Amino acid sequence: VDVTRIDITPVTAALTDPIELEVEYDVDGLLCEASWEIKFMVDSAHKRHVIVLGSTDVESTVSGPASFYFSVPHVDVSDITPGTLTNCGLLTASLQASGQGVLDVNMVVVVTKEAGGLMARKIYSPLED
């Protein structure tokens, strides 16, 4: 599997704002019972916090170009302390097929505390220079 395009909307926003993710990729064989799981992860000194945002429908994909679209209306980080959030995290799209991990697409998420206490995020595509 070769990822050819990643579109993240919005790239910069409040941390809890909606996320839309569209990924195009090429498949070099059959992927049976495939789906993508989208997670937001942030590490602290003592714990890894993993928030599962959702997943795509399960489908089989044949050789050639393929894509998926995912959106989530809200990112719930209420169980994570602000001090832990103001760090680098990962937005990860994990492709599974036939119950096996195939590929992880990791997008770095930088979270900052803005004036007035707003937690803001910026998501970086691994395909950008």
Image: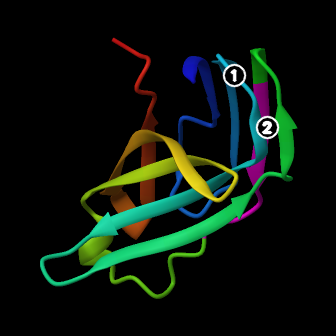
- Give the residue drawn at x 65%, y 59%: 99
Can I make out residue 110 in this image?
yes
Quarter containing the C terminus: top left
The crowding category of the residue bearing disc 2, from other C-alpha atoms within 10 Å (few below 14, some 14 to 19, many at least 20), is few
Q: Residue 30: x, y in percent?
A: 75, 28
Q: Residue 26: x, y in percent?
A: 66, 16
Residue 92 lies, with reference to residue 66, above or below; the image says: below
Q: How is the image coloured?
A: rainbow
Q: Nearer the viewer, residue 55 or 79?
A: 55
Magenta-colored stretch includes residue 69 = yes
* Span highlighted in magenta in the image: 67-75
> What secondary structure is found at the residue carrying circle 2?
strand
The crowding category of the residue bearing disc 1, from other C-alpha atoms within 10 Å (few below 14, some 14 to 19, many at least 20), is few
Q: Nearer the viewer, residue 42 or 73?
A: 42
Q: Residue 125: x, y in percent?
A: 45, 28
Q: Is 52 left, or right, of 97 in this rendering?
A: left
Q: Nearer the viewer, residue 8 or 52?
A: 52
**Which residue carries the number 1 mark?**
29
> What secondary structure is found at the residue carrying circle 1?
loop
CA separation in Å, label 1 and label 2: 21 Å
Identify the mark nearer the N-term, 1 or 2: 1
Q: Main secondary structure of the magenta part?
A: strand
- Give the residue drawn at x 59%, y 69%: 52
Magenta-colored stretch includes residue 41 = no
**Which residue carries the number 2 mark?**
69
User: In which image quadrant can residue 48 be found?
Assistant: bottom left
Quarter containing the N terminus: top right
User: In which image quadrant can residue 53 be found?
Assistant: bottom right
Amino acid type, label 2: Tyr
Q: Is 126 left, or right, of 69 in this rendering?
A: left
Of discs 1 and 2, which sits in the foreground? 1
